[in-house]
Image: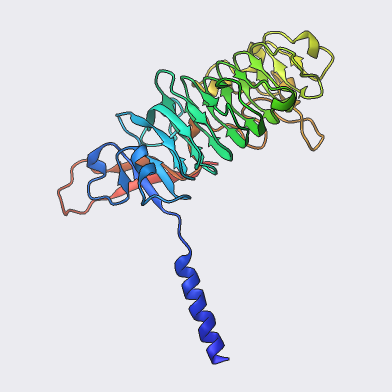
Amino acid sequence: MKNLSLFLLFAFVILSLNISKADTWRVNNNPLYTEGCDHCFSQLQDAVNSPLVNPGDTIHIEASTTDYEGVDITKRLVIIGTGYFLDENGPLQQNQLSATIKGDVNLMEGSEGTKLIGLRIKGSYAEIGIFTNDISIERCYSGSAGIFFQNNDWSISNIEIDRCYLSQISRIGYPDPINNLHITNCYIDGGAYLPGEGANQYTGVFAHNVVNGKLGGSNGIDYYNNIFKGEFPEGDNSTSNVFNNIFTDELPDWLSESDNMFMPEGTVFVAEGSTDGILQVNPPNICPECYEGYDPGGANDVEIGMFGGNTPYFLSGIPNIPTVYKLHSNTNVYQSDTTHVAISTCTNH
């Protein structure tokens, strides 16, 4: 029994030594904030390329006055930014600078399982390019070319785009099928183009979004609890996969006999607010129809739009990690002196 106990203890120690622990890394392009730091990089691509950064690790991109370069991601990583519109929705963070990536963010083969959270991407034709499976994009801003699917010769699956502020969602060329695509609680300014028929059918859910431009859709996707400001051509869609949506321009004829509704934009949305805050719907006494969205549980009393449902849009795309929203300290302190610092933190769901 004693020998068995020693063997089991030894085996447990060996097993523990072989279990790798996910690590956390920082990216900051201001050398004043990374001097002497062995877990820091100046660019996101440097961190991705480093042999020290392993699949499953987390990378925090920190606020800066200087934009970061684009990146090709080839590992399974969690990459967290600072959000966007921070000066409009305060006080959400003490530091109201964003961590802006000026260039493409491409999710390449090898990045399966990657999560992007709270990134701000801008620049001429800068985009998030999806080339592979099992990708999650949450609370991100992509204000130039938005998100593109780039799978011209292969199908991809299990893509989640949630609580984002995007210029558009589209595709490059004529990609093969996209399976289990979930786009929820997003604002899409320039429209979404998700066609697919027959062998190239798209499947998934498009729910609780606000779409400003034209929507091209596939009947393999269920569209519900959205607010559409632009066109929605019939294509191969029907009332069986397009239901409980609000149209603020006009209700398409092919949806006239359905649970879809026309409501004037002034009745639907609040009159003032920040860039993303103004996309909230009015209270029930002004727009009762805004609270008659489809509920899988059967009640049909869900708020329509990006602030409704199980994962409501979060202002400024603040990541769901604790943040410092207030900091106070003495402005003049000599080296080696003692000073008092007061901070206020909050969690973000």
**Residue 71 locus on image (x, y percent):** 40, 33
Residue 120 visible from this viewpoint: yes
Residue 201 visible from this viewpoint: no
Q: Could you say which is closer to the camera, residue 274 or residue 321?
A: 321
Q: Residue furthest front?
A: 153
**Is residue 215 toward the left or the right of residue 39 in the image?**
right
**Residue 223 locus on image (x, y percent):** 72, 25
Q: Residue furthest right?
A: 257
Residue 68 sits in quarter: top left
Location of residue 327 with respect to 149 vertically, above or below: below
Q: The N terminus is located in which quarter?
A: bottom right
Residue drawn 79% across the image and 14% down it: 255
**Residue 271 locus on image (x, y percent):** 57, 15
Location of residue 336 with respect to 103 vertically, above or below: below
Residue 298 sits in quarter: top right
Residue drawn 71% across the image and 30% down it: 203
**Is residue 220 toward the left or the right of residue 182 in the image?**
right
Q: Could you say which is closer to the camera, residue 269 or residue 200?
A: 200
Residue drawn 60% across the image and 35% down it: 160
Q: Residue furthest bottom?
A: 2
**Is residue 197 toward the left or the right of residue 46 in the image?**
right
Residue drawn 55% across the image and 41% down it: 349
Q: Residue furthest left?
A: 334
Q: How many marks?
A: 0
**Residue 69 locus on image (x, y percent):** 35, 30
